[in-house]
Image: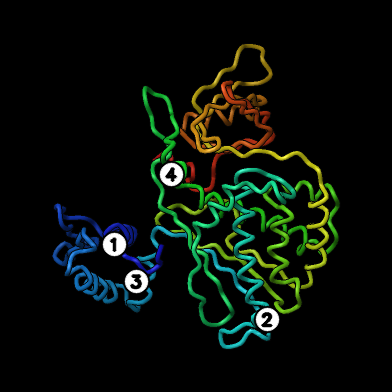
Amino acid sequence: MNTFDIGFEEIVSYLRRSGWQRSLTGPLAEMWYPEGDEDNPILVPKESRAPDFRRTLAMIMDELARKEHRPQTEIHLDISRQFIDVTDLRAEDDHITEGTISIHAGLGLINSANQMMVSAAAATLRRQGYYGKSMPRDAYKHARRMRLGQTRPGSYIVPIISSAKFSSLVTVSEEESRLNVSADESYFERRMLTTLSRALETLSELAVERGRTPSKDDMLGAVDDGVSSELCSAILDVIGHGEVEEFDVAFNWAPSSPAPKTIADRIAFFGEAAPIIEHIKGELKDSRSQAERVLYGVIRRLSLKRNETVGHVAMDTVIDGKPRVVAFDLPLNTYSRAARYHGERRPVVVRGILDATPGRQATMTVHAFDADRSVESFDDVLQ
């Protein structure tokens, strides 16, 4: 994945979001014009490997720069980012000058990037205070798909690049919502970043905003939001050695997809919080709380009999790479939300204790249920 690769889809996505409209389409190219200016269209070639593609792209950039009154370099970057999320890891300290950083601090930042993404991938699959040798193998697989971009001038910034190009997750057949299993994998990296943002926000609230050592219940409760001993280690790799005063993580969501709602776009940690984070890390490592699986999917069936105090739900999901139907019960107040999401064909997420014994119906004792807010909003689904 290269942040500077631009093809037909990136150009069209950018034009559509900038108010341009398609006038003609053919097998080799399309014509697009600015809103209200049909007399000045531009040609957008469909084949990026064509000999004249780069020359045509330069002409498009010239026209966009003229109309938008800003440098071509900015427009080029915006177009190239249409289908990628960029997570910036930024280290700030008086000793970081002219875009350079000490080798020790730089290695800590790179190690932090790896640990952070592995822990986020693990928490997206399974909530656990400490993974150790039980770290899911898929967590490493998903983290390896992320890419490191070039550092940028000023404060030392390491960009992590991930795919935000999604296939259609929900299909409707005979008035029944079904999970498009082949598309589910395309959502994982965005779910990882959503999990990471929530976990970092929770950890920051515990370690930075309160300014005191959190209670054991608070620390164990943070596991529900994706905090783990490994995530604490990732933060300490940067601020725990006295060479970086401030470390922040900023999420720059792809323009082509709605940004996840109700989560922070930037979370900061300061060197003075290192002792508290070290304490949280130790407590979570010593905890023996039961691991909880996290499953994403769409509701296939709902059932509520008269006078029952719980509703019954069957959900299409993916378990260990294979399509499965998992059954679970929900209390009535939560079941009503499930019924609404089902009617909206809204993807959902559940967390709890899973029994997926081969050859039997998969079941889950659910401890948390919600809409999958990592990609789409309610309005996006209804449209």
Which of 198/379 is in front? 198
Q: Which mark is residue 93?
A: 2
- 3 or 1: tag closer to the N-terminus: 1
For the N terminus, the image quarter is: bottom left
Q: Residue at x 52, y 82 (%)?
A: 153
Which of 143/196 is in front? 143
Q: Which mark is residue 76?
A: 3
Q: Residue at x 34, y 71 (%)?
A: 76
Horizontal and vertical percent position of residue 180: 42, 35
Gap between marks 3 and 1 measured at Cα: 11 Å
Q: Residues within 10 Å of mark 1 (few under 14, many from 20)?
A: some
Horizontal and vertical percent position of residue 191: 54, 49
162 shown above or below 217: below
285 shown above or below 366: below
Q: Which mark is residue 380?
A: 4
Gap between marks 3 and 2 measured at Cα: 31 Å
Q: Residue at x 75, y 38 (%)?
A: 290
SS at badge 3: helix
Give the residue type at disc 3. Answer: His
382 shown above or below 222: above
Q: Check disc 1 and report the residue beneath it.
A: 7
Gap between marks 3 and 4 measured at Cα: 27 Å
Which of 13/340 is in front? 13
Horizontal and vertical percent position of residue 342: 50, 29
